[in-house]
Image: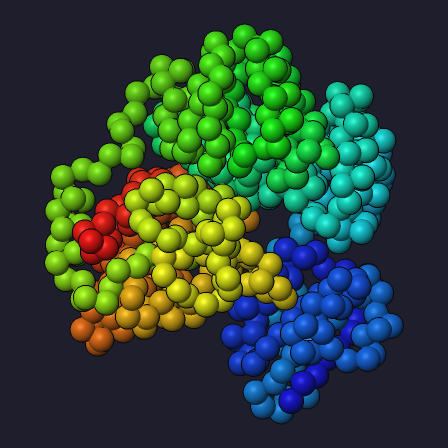
Amino acid sequence: MKDYKILKNSYYDSVTLMSTTVTIKKDLELKELVMFMGTEMNKAMIESIGLYHLAMDEALPNDLIIAAELSQGNPDWAEEVLNRLNSRKKDAKETDKVYKTINQAADAIDANIAVISVPGIYAANEAYKALDKNMHVMLFSDNVSVEDEIQLKDIAIKKDLLVMGPDCGTAIINGKGLCFANQVSEGSIGLVAASGTGLQEVTVIIDRFGGGITQAIGVGGRDLSEAVGGRMMLKGIDALDQDEKTEVIVLISKPPHPTVLERILDRLKKIHKPTVLCLLDSHLDEKITNVYFTSTMTEAAMKALSLVGRKTPDLLNVDLKTKEIIEQQQRLFSKTQKKIKGLYCGGTLTAESLSILRPMVENITSNVAKKDKEKMHNPLISDGHNLVDLGDDIFTQGKPHPMIEPTIRFSRMIEEAKNPETAVMLLDFELGIGSHDDPVSITLDTIKESFEIAKKGNRNLSIVAYVCGTDKDHQGLEKSEELLRSAGVIVAKTNAHAAIIAGLLVKEVER
């Protein structure tokens, strides 16, 4: 039975709706549940899931649409959903003041940054308002037009402001993490990144070995495209170059458009601070004084630490104990087990693993691949060596991102455990602000079930995991890693390290 409810003028932000949908669905034993504001794009999502009703045509963007497929008759289901949704809202303190518009907030309090997370068709308008009030902008929203992005960034540059995004998920400004970010120490390393989980990865490694962050500026994945021209990456470089506290600059991105890369390199020739340049899947022939090129985020963090006088071990080295574990695991694989199955929450972590594993294994494919021969024909179907970004739209349509709700990864884990060709399962776990309160603990039962499935099939399964976080994160890095080790998981030091271990596990198997 399918049913729906439309609540007029009942606004809920998308993060709240996404982060509670899976839990409420499970608690109320619903077959399916979606909760969206009534934008046209959201209506299309509801229709694609098969829960659309003609009455939803009349819903407006400020109306909440709740649609469900019930496992049994329950006339009060919608009321129960709302009660649970509201109970998960943090109780506002009496002293807290809620402002309905950016202008109201800017006029009432001394704020210098606005974080915008509204449907894309409204996001640009709110960003223009914030810039008009001389506020920096973090544009979490996606689906903002390229034309608006360019105009917003041009206005910001004229006003000496930042526009981070659109589709910017991570930043650390003046020690405060915004959206998805980890708790890290303040220090002397500044970062600019066109990557959310890439920024998280480098900052947590820096923190882990005694370094600290001045600013970590996200620019949005489209900033380094030919159209946008690296406007905010260049602005971020200038800002960090002028910042007295920043001694070393780190830039992180997937390969930018060649014309944009040329502009970035020209700008780096004019600054005097050492800069670490990490461009995944890219090669740099030109040598520039004080610019250090790295091909992995681990190497970028290590180099930045060395430039501020912090020593680190070789975080890509596989130590003797791990080599022994690899050899033990290899001897237990059956003849059919030859493949790596990467199930990732972080898109940039997926891309980094692809670049590392490409020379180690044959015919690896991924839904983040840019090369045609490496693209998965269908990310929903496991076939060969696969690295799957589960945060891709094909998996998250109508559902929360796996960093917010890891349970959407569980069914794919079970599927891969049943697959006779699976030798290694690669997993990532992101801690910090915005992420699930305990992504490791909630996954332990599925890890245990995966091991049992393989055992019943007379197969050995190796699970290699990496936890992106710090012990200052409320989930706790050390606690999370120990839970995984106790469950029989091989825990890597960094994301790149995890990929290397996975490659070594199947190296002898492939011969």
Coordinates of residue 97 in the picture (x, y in percent): 75, 45
Coordinates of residue 203 in the picture (x, y in percent): 46, 32
Who is closer to the viewer here, 200 or 495?
A: 495
Who is closer to the viewer here, 110 or 5?
A: 5
Report the residue at 81% width, 74% height from top.
56
Report the residue at 62% width, 32% height from top.
257
In the rendered structure, the answer to whether residue 150 lies left or right of residue 272 reads: right
The outermost residue toward the front is 373
| Quadrant of the rendered image containing residue 145 | top right
Report the residue at 54% width, 8% height from top.
272
In the rendered structure, the answer to whether residue 77 lies left or right of residue 305 reads: right
The outermost residue toward the bottom is 73
Q: Is residue 287 visible in the rendered structure shown here? A: yes
Instruction: Give the answer, above or below, for where 231 lies relative to 25.
Output: above
In the rendered structure, the answer to whether residue 352 lies left or right of residue 330 reads: right
Who is closer to the viewer here, 448 or 226?
A: 226
Instruction: Give the answer, above or below, for where 404 lies relative to 34.
Output: above
Q: Is residue 173 visible in the rendered structure shown here? A: no
| Quadrant of the rendered image containing residue 112 | top right
Coordinates of residue 84 in the picture (x, y in percent): 61, 70
Coordinates of residue 357 in the picture (x, y in percent): 35, 45
Report the residue at 20% width, 53% height from top.
511
